[in-house]
Amino acid sequence: MSRTATSLRLCTFCGTRISIGHGVMLVKNDGQIEWTCSSKCKKNLRVLKRDPRKLKWTKKYAKGGLKKKGA
Ligand SMILES: [Zn+2]
């Protein structure tokens, strides 16, 4: 059971799996939980406020750039 729990926890920013004992959890005032795997992701998410879809090293990267919906 503990094995499945690790696979469900993904980094909010880059989208990679976070194993037990790793990462930082932030609970926002609205109840939203953010998990980050490293200080790199933490800074990009909270300080630099970057879009993970624009960065090639994340799993959320959109190939060919971001497209406008309905256009
Ligand atoms: Zn990450």
Image (tube, grey):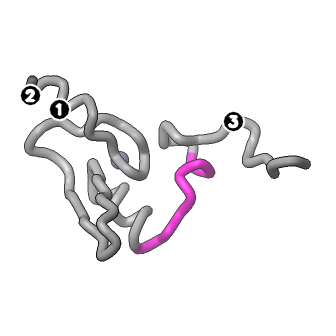
Disc 2 residue type? Ser
How many neighbours does mark 3 have within 10 angstroms: few (below 14), some (14-19), or many (20 or more)?
Answer: few
Whether residue 49 appears in magenta in the rendering, the answer is yes
Using the image, determine if residue 34 lies above or below residue 27.
above
Sequence-wise, the earlier of marks 2 and 3 is 2
Q: Which mark is residue 2?
A: 2
Disc 3 residue type? Lys
Q: How many marks?
A: 3
Horizontal relation, residue 53 to residue 19: left or right? right
Which residue is found at the position 62% from the left and 51% from the top? 54
How many neighbours does mark 1 have within 10 angstroms: few (below 14), some (14-19), or many (20 or more)?
Answer: few
The CA span between labels 1 and 2 is 5 Å
Mark 1 sits on what residue?
A: 5
The CA span between labels 2 and 3 is 34 Å
Using the image, determine if residue 6 lies above or below residue 3.
below
Q: What stretch of residues is rendered in magenta?
A: 47-55
